[in-house]
Image (cartoon, coloured by chain):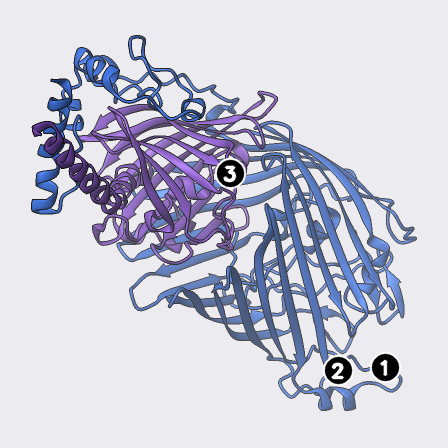
Amino acid sequence: MFVKKLVTTAAIATLSISTAFAQDVQEIVNKASVAAYYQGEDGRAKVHMSIKDAQGRERTRDFVILRKDVDNVDNGEQRFYVFFERPADVNKTSFLVWKHADADDDRWLYLPALDLVKRIAPSDERTSFVGSHFFYEDVSGRGPEEDNHVLEEETDDYYVVNSTPKDTAGVEFTSYKNWIHKTTLIPVKTEYYDESGDAYRTYTALGVETIDGKPTVVKSSMADTRIGGVTEMQYSEVAYDTGLPEDIFSERYLRNPPRRELR
Amino acid sequence: MKLKTILTAALLGVTPAIAQDAPPLPAGLSSSDAQEEADKKDRSSSAPTLPSGLDDNTAPTLPSGLGEPTGPALPPGLAGNESETEETTLSNTNEPFSAPFGLTGFIEARAGARIVSDPTQKTLSIGEIRAQLGRDIETRHATFRFVGDFFYDQVEDVSDVDLETGRGFFDLREANVLVRPLEFLDIKAGRQILTWGVGDLVFINDLFPKDFRSFFIGRDDEYLKAPSDAIRISAFSNIANIEFVYTPRFDADRFISGDRISYYNPALGRTAGRDAVITPEARDDWFSEDEFAARAYRNIAGFETALYGYAGYWKTPEGQTPTGEPFHPRLAVIGGSLRGPVRGGILTAEAGHYFSRDDLSGADPFIRNSETRFLVGYEREIASELTASVQYVGEILSDYAALSSSLPPGAAAPDRMRHVVTLRLTKLMLNQNLTLSGFNFWSPNEKDGYFRFRASYKLNDAWLTEAGGNIFYGSNENTFFGQLQDNTNLFVGVRRNF
């Protein structure tokens, strides 16, 4: 009798848990997005990229990335400034992104040899960022509201979230699965699946450091079996809340890089 | 007993969720924070088995002792025992070759030939070895920048260095200083490359010097821009940003003069080249034969808008003195431009009115008429790594009646309006190491055009190889592109960046 009552209560409890999860998976994803892309009000890092193609040949990219959250709103508008140092053919090329929460991002590229500010068509956010396995969107972040999320499983360490795009136009995946670390809410692994359910693209956080009290991915990789090979990104000299002025993210500084902030 | 514990935990977990609408912590998570290996092990072994199939794509095996794969292994830094993994060792980056003294640049070789015969020119269209050296020097208050090209040119018979035309064996590209005397003010003075406007290889309000010789013989795109000796003052505010460029001595285009690229000579009534080289009257008086350019710009609702003004001279010798001497007549231009996102692409529009100040009535047949130029363009990605952009460019003569009636008897009147359509296709392949691009100019009314194409491949981070061509076509030899038909060429190049 007592046992039966207990089981019934347990069943109700389980139901309540799953409803609660349905509401809260979005919150988990929002927080994961914040942990990955919105730490602090602004940030800067030096990035070394190692791009290995299917034959194992290596190309590298070195750049400094500056970020600022507009009005310090999590999962809101952001500005990115990327200044390339290596390889030599892209030295001093700068790249500016105004990331919008609910519209296409605005992007500009500055080619110093021509003194040319070029605006880049917004349609290709899921194409390779500077020839790497990372997409533009992987660098600036995918909006948490762009997909439907289901908390598929919980392990000791992870929320395992399965996400399917609300709008399938403009994305190459059918769904993706994210292993989000429970304590820090950092996405540790992301797998993208094609129509037949095969994982073809895998993001992995390879190293995390706590910087200014904020757990930060300092090493990560992206592999893509469709094209073969893998790109590894290493972050160094990471700093948060450096007080970046917002006007850095403008044509003025695209043409004349903000040396002090990049150093 | 165990079952009871779990159920109790579950019940405890649910209560706060109902009470305060916070994300409920399921049984187990709260204790997982303790992150004690022994505890983990205990809980893990009591967890339900994963559905079949899941373990396949979640791959990484857990640390020994944990029975079932429940997700990726934690990266260093998240594993719990922070003290041991705090320092993530970053592998040393391969230090690429760099030149001494902080110099950057490249060394390259380029060769090309005309593929149609031109009696007035050499067959070799380009044959050069070039080394570009650049250096930035930063001080507390200023940034100095120097870029210069040393080259050996097999085609031109010029050995003396001419810094204005970039001939000889040295071309000074940049030698300038940038200062920021006030928070809202940038000043860049000296030799510099200047560009503004929104056209794609079409310039309306950008009257800074161009180098069409380099553009047509297959040098890198960067050489389309010739340097200016100028001071650029930029003031920034929330209302609008304003820029002034003062060039104290007129900088002409490095235009088609016949010595390297043949052109249609109306006086001779035929295509001419090294047998009739154009040498216009010099405009080289400091501070009197000068140029002013200005731009005001700001963003409005996602669109970049700008207004422009220019006072100076036609950049190519568009006038002839009574004695038949070519010269650069006076010119003023006002215009505007617009650029912004529309339906997943970028829309551009630009217009400018050219006031030919030495012939405002348009009655002088020896000086180019005033005209209005405009363009509308659209660019977007049409397939993966394939970008297309189209432009329509129109040029309307202002005083057509005056021009027609003033032409000498027998002279053919130009069309009142010139139309040009451009199409650019750019395809990136092989991890963006291979770039294929084509750009076509086509004028339906002049029945001529120009197709430039290029394939460039990055062998590695330092080496680049390139091949391409410049194809000129047209029904007549006296039209804008038609006159260049004999200059059709193919080229190859190899470059080492450092």
Give me the chain that's blue. Answer: B
Q: Amino acid at mark 2?
A: Pro
Mark 3, secondary structure of its residue = loop
Badge 3 and badge 2 in a common chain: no
Q: Amino acid at mark 3?
A: Val
What residue did someone put label 1 on? B411
Label 3, label 2: how many angstroms apart (C-alpha)? 52 Å
Identify whether A110 is placed above or below B40.
below
**Mark 3 or mark 2, which is nearer to you?**
3
Identify whether B234 is placed above or below B5.
below
Task: Classify 10 Å Cα crowding around label 3: few (below 14), some (14-19), many (20 and above).
Answer: some
Give me the chain that's purple. Answer: A
What residue did someone put label 3 on? A130
User: x%, y% of residue A154?
Assistant: 27, 30
Which of the image's four quarters has the C terminus of chain B?
top right
Q: Amino acid at mark 1?
A: Ala
Task: Classify 10 Å Cα crowding around label 2: few (below 14), some (14-19), many (20 and above).
Answer: some
Task: State the residue in front, B309 or A182.
Answer: A182
Task: Classify 10 Å Cα crowding around label 1: few (below 14), some (14-19), many (20 and above).
Answer: few
User: x%, y% of residue B336?
Assistant: 49, 72
Which residue sits at x=70%, y=41%?
B455
Label 3, label 1: how many angstroms apart (C-alpha)? 54 Å
Point out which mark residue B365 bears: 2
For disc 3, the chain is A
Marks 1 & 2, CB-CB < 8 Å contact: yes
